[in-house]
Image: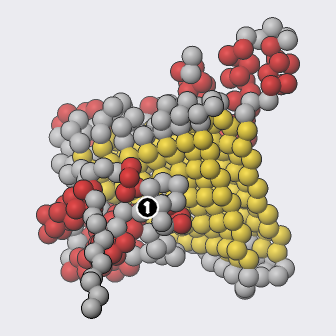
Amino acid sequence: MSAAIRPVRTQAELGLADLYATARHGLPGGKDIAAVRAAAFNHFVLAGLPNARVESWKYTDLRRLMRDAKPLAPPPDATSKEEARAAGELLSGLDFRRVVIVDGAFVEELSDLAGLEPGVMVRSMAEALALDEPMLSQGLGVMVPADDSALALNTALAGDGVVITVSPDVAVVRPIHLAFVNTATAPAAMVTRSLVVIGKGARATFIETHEGRGQADYQVNTALQLVIGDEAKVDHVKVTREGKGAIHIGTLLAHVGTRATFNQWGFTTGGAVVRHQLFVLLSGEGTTANLGGLSLLAERQHADTTLAVEHAAPGCHSREVFKAVVDDEARAVFQGKITVRQQAQKTDAKMMTRALLLSDDAEADGKPELEIFADDVQCGHGATTGNLDDQLKFYLMARGIPEKQAEALLIQAFAAEVVETIEHEGVRDALMEAIAGWLGQRG
């Protein structure tokens, strides 16, 4: 006789089960959407919160880091909407078209939707889900391989977000700024799902920012799905400046077509625990992808970037460069994997991660990987971790530059390699100013 083994559920997992049971009937969507949600939550129940036994989460044990489940945030009131008017001040002065999501809900009156280019549509995900459209019920599932319980939880609980479609051959002149603002004063959870579909030959730039209150205790589970058509070009920049007590789990799912170009950059300075996971499928021949990121971490922050790029067609080109500057007792994690399928001959792919440690208690974990099934490829990966170069620091100080300023110059030079690859000059300059501001807070 054998006894059944039942996994012990954490307080957070039990709370999430109660949350889904309470919220599921009020979530947007018809029967098809509800079926997708139920299947996703069943997956989560079986897998539980990601933990150290899951290889892709080995450095970010969410069962340990997430102690409880917050209730879903209520719809934003007038005070929250007024506070959100100042969202994205880092990018103030730039001529962007703002689309504002406050406490997980799309707010049309704060969004700049007038004068959209013909062929461009922006609408609430909640409204789109209510129509139970096949594109959305299929889109809520996984477009690229990603057996991930955090994403399953997002699928089960997502209430709102945005749906953006760009017709073939349309050039979106003004970059679209997706401003996610978390104003909740009480502990709350924001679960959002957004879908962006770019037609063949179209051009668009998207800036995604996430910010919240200084010490607020809240949780964010957000996902963005990008469907990029053949010969299209898409730039995407994500800036994460959450409050000091926040947990932020962000997922990017990108499906890239033939002879397309996809450029993606991430910039992280805020949040207690931040996890960015990117799943990128290069499905068409002759496609180019450039992926990069920079994390600036201090105190006891924990930031994890986990990347999976799959080359599934011949002649594709990808470059991945991710950097972290880690101070105090903070921890930076990078896990990157490039997979080259057997049919993806003539692949050219290179991945690099670098970490700069500014204190004896700082930590960086880097794990780049290659999995290659084709024989005619050029692939490589590398990882470095180290301290500031004492000789360069001495060189600067010998020329009259104070020690702290000398350190700041070296850190800026280290970080600039990633930021300078951003094509939009205004965003590039704004992020360089953010780097300078972070360095100024070091004292």
Counting from the top left corner in percent of width and height, residue 260 is at 66, 68
- 272 in relation to 49, above or below: above
**Mark 1 is on which residue type?**
Asn
- 415 in relation to 35, above or below: above
Q: Residues within 10 Å of mark 1 (few under 14, many from 20)?
A: some
Counting from the top left corner in percent of width and height, residue 185 is at 23, 35
- 169 in relation to 319, above or below: below
Query: The residue tagged with tag 1: helix, strand or loop?
Result: loop
- Give the residue at x 60% y 41%: 363
- Give the residue at x 55% y 30%: 328
Q: How many marks?
A: 1
Q: Closer to the camera, 114 or 137?
A: 137
- Give the residue at x 44% y 69%: 148
Q: Is residue 277 left or right of residue 371?
A: left
Counting from the top left corner in percent of width and height, residue 389 is at 79, 29
Counting from the top left corner in percent of width and height, residue 271 is at 43, 40
Q: How is the image coloured?
A: secondary structure
Q: As drawn, which residue projects farthest toward the top?
A: 400
Q: As drawn, which residue projects farthest toward the bottom?
A: 1
Please indicate, yes or no, whether residue 261 appears anywhere in the rendered image: no
Quarter holding residue 408: top right
Please indicate, yes or no, whether residue 134 appears anywhere in the rendered image: yes
Quarter holding residue 385: top right
Circle 1 sits on which residue? 51
Q: Is residue 418 left or right of residue 271?
A: right
Image quadrant occupied by the C terminus: top right
